[in-house]
């Protein structure tokens, strides 16, 4: 124990591992090589003290005795002098990419780097791997059951185990070297390039699999239901030194696929067996199955002719991408203390187009909602809502809220004020000087801009009033009649509308209604319709934006993809 204390500089209070092992040896009679080395170290220390003549505890050592002891208790001169267990702890803190070069230093380092503890820690800390390879009967049970059902619902779990590779002899080093590290660039959040429809893909590490989950909104109009998800592809270790890519599309189970990294923040998937996507009943059976999964209903249940055309159009368009898809990286918006509410992803109602996924982010005095999934009118990647947080709107009493004319008067008053301000600083200053304290809310302050607008937005967020009654005006269509009857705040904003094929796009005024931290709505005045948005609560991994600059650059790129 004295040798251990001199080498690693820690005692029992610092959880010296060699001392712990020695204690276990005393209790359980272990005869490991490490314990033998420790016993030899104790023997050496005893001989050293014996050669020095020894001394009773009541007598202090003399100068010659102290010098003899200090000569035997010299600290290690290099890493090679440290005990193996301490080197394992040190090497475990290094990034996995540095370990191969470290193994070239000497034979001792190469032997130590074959320790499973080091690579297990790298898999956990770098990729969030939570599972133990030695307990594969527990790992990924839910995922396996999902795969069983997709292969053949009649297959039993015991029989399905025979279809999976044998992981008994696989170690963490193989998993890190041949699976996690080579495919690290595809982990995170992505938007598939499916024309105007877009989508949301999250690639994560799940046990010994890397799985690409496509997130789908709940069935229209149940906007507050949880998201649905479907595996598009998976990567796993079929052999100890080789990773296999499999396509999960279709209803015949996993089959051969391929993944190519086109460029930074972009990759493509390709199916090598598209016959697995086909059904015995042909396109009609495929359409009925797709319609039930996508909309939760049959075509006979949809009486609106225009909606039937939109659904059929989406099926025909998206079916062209069942063999090859390209994905572009996206990030979750950064969160700042001054934000009105926590930014993130929301599900929203969009009339006959069904539910769509949007991303809410805050930029000073403005809140922006960007589409992650879209439709033929306003495609994915476009700015669907632009909210001016420096322009709050005070709602009237419930009786006047039921009047669309009263709501239009309030919102259009703010809209005209904003339009005058956008004509130029000089025109805005002149208009403010003439009108004095006039405004949509009767405030005596002039509209803020720049840093003043950001401060106004922050003040509005911090001084939010108590909940007030809310009701939709008569004549405003709501896809979901079950909406909150109280709200916290309202702001002026604009929504993007366009014709089929994103023709003649324009921004139309509307009212942003904040219900609570997880729900908000938007009243489209020109369309006389109401959209309700509910927060997406799924935990999306590897999706945080590195910086606000990178996130804003991503938003600009998203708009250019579908413009």
Image (cartoon, rainbow, N blue to C red):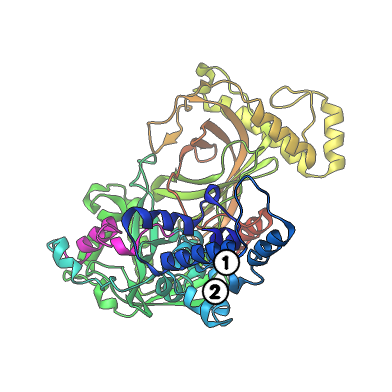
Tell me which residue sits at (55%, 59%) in the image. 2
Q: Position of residue 404 (x, y in %)?
A: 52, 28
Q: Which residue is mark 1?
A: 94
Q: Mark yes or no: residue 373 visible.
A: no
Q: Are marks 1 and 2 in contact (CB under 8 Å)?
A: yes
Locate the C terminus and report the quarter of the image it occupies. Answer: bottom right
Q: Is residue 407 above or below residue 229?
A: above
Mark 1 vs 2, N-terminal side: 1
Q: Secondary structure at mark 2?
A: helix
Instruction: Check disc 1 and report its element: helix, strand or loop.
Output: loop
Residue 145 within the magenta-colored segment of the rendering: yes
Q: What mark, if any, has residue 7 been given in the picture?
A: none
User: Image check: 419 left or right of 531?
Assistant: right
Name the residue: 35% across, 65% down. 31
From the viewer's perspective, tell me whether residue 131 is left or right of residue 401: left
Stretch in magenta? 129-152
Q: Residue at x 56, y 82 (%)?
A: 106
Q: Quadrant of residue 34?
A: bottom left
Q: x%, y% of residue 524?
A: 53, 39
Total numbered labels: 2
- Badge 1 density bin: few <14, some 14–19, many ≥20, Cα 10 Å: some
Residue 13 versus residue 463: which sits nearer the camera?
13
Name the residue beneath numbered marker 2.
99
Residue sitting nearer the eye, 305 or 477: 477
In the image, residue 276 sits, relative to residue 56, either above or below, namely below
């Amino acid at each position: 124990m004295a040798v251990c204390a001199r080498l690693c500089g820690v005692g029992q209070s610092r959880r010296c591992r060699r001392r712990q092992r020695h204690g276990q040896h005393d209790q359980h009679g272990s005869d490991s090589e490490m314990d033998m080395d420790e016993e030899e170290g104790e023997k050496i220390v005893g001989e050293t003290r014996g050669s020095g003549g020894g001394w009773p505890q009541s007598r202090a050592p003399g100068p010659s005795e102290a010098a003899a002891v200090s000569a035997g208790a010299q600290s290690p001169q290099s890493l090679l002098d440290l005990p193996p267990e301490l080197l394992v702890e040190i090497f475990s803190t290094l990034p996995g990419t540095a370990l191969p070069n470290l193994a070239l230093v000497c034979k001792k380092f190469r032997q130590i780097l074959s320790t499973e503890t080091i690579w297990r820690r790298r898999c956990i800390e770098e990729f969030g791997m939570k599972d133990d390879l030695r307990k594969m009967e527990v790992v990924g049970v839910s995922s396996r059951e999902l795969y069983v059902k997709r292969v053949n619902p009649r297959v039993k779990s015991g029989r399905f185990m025979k279809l999976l590779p044998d992981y008994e002899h696989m170690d963490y080093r193989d998993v890190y070297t041949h699976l996690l590290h080579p495919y690290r660039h595809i982990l995170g959040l992505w938007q598939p390039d499916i024309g105007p429809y877009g989508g949301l893909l999250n690639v994560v590490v799940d046990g010994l699999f890397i799985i690409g989950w496509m997130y789908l909104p709940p069935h229209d109009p149940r906007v507050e239901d949880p998201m649905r998800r479907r595996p598009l592809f998976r990567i796993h270790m079929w052999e100890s030194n080789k990773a296999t890519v499999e396509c999960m599309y279709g209803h015949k189970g996993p089959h051969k696929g391929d993944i190519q990294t086109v460029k930074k923040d972009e990759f493509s998937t390709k199916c090598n067996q598209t016959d697995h996507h086909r059904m015995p009943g042909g396109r009609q059976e495929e359409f009925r199955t797709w319609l039930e999964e996508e909309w939760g209903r049959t075509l006979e249940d949809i009486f609106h002719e225009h909606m039937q055309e939109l659904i059929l159009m989406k099926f025909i368009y998206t079916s062209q991408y069942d063999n090859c898809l390209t994905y572009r990286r996206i990030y979750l918006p950064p969160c700042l203390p001054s934000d009105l509410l926590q930014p993130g992803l929301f599900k929203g109602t969009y009339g006959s187009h069904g539910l769509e996924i949007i991303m809410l982010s805050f930029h000073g005095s403005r809140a922006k909602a960007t589409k992650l999934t879209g439709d033929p009118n306003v495609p994915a990647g476009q700015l669907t809502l632009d909210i001016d947080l420096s322009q709050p709107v005070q709602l009237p009493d419930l009786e006047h809220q039921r009047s669309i004319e009263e709501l239009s008067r309030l919102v259009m008053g703010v809209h005209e004020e904003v339009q005058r301000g956008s004509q130029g600083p000089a025109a805005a200053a002149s208009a403010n000087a003439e009108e004095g304290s006039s405004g949509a809310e009767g405030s005596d302050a002039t509209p803020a801009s720049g840093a003043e607008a950001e401060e106004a937005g922050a003040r509005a967020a911090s001084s939010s009033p108590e909940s007030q009654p809310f009701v939709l005006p008569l004549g405003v269509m709501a896809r979901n009649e079950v909406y909150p009857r109280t709200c916290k705040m309202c702001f002026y904003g604009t929504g993007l509308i366009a014709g089929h094929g994103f023709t003649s796009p324009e921004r139309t005024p509307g009212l942003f209604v904040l219900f609570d931290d997880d729900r908000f709505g938007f009243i489209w005045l020109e369309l006389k319709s109401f959209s309700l948005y509910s927060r997406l609560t799924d935990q999306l991994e590897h999706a945080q934006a590195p910086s606000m600059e990178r996130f804003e650059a991503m938003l600009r790129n998203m708009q250019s993809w579908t413009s």
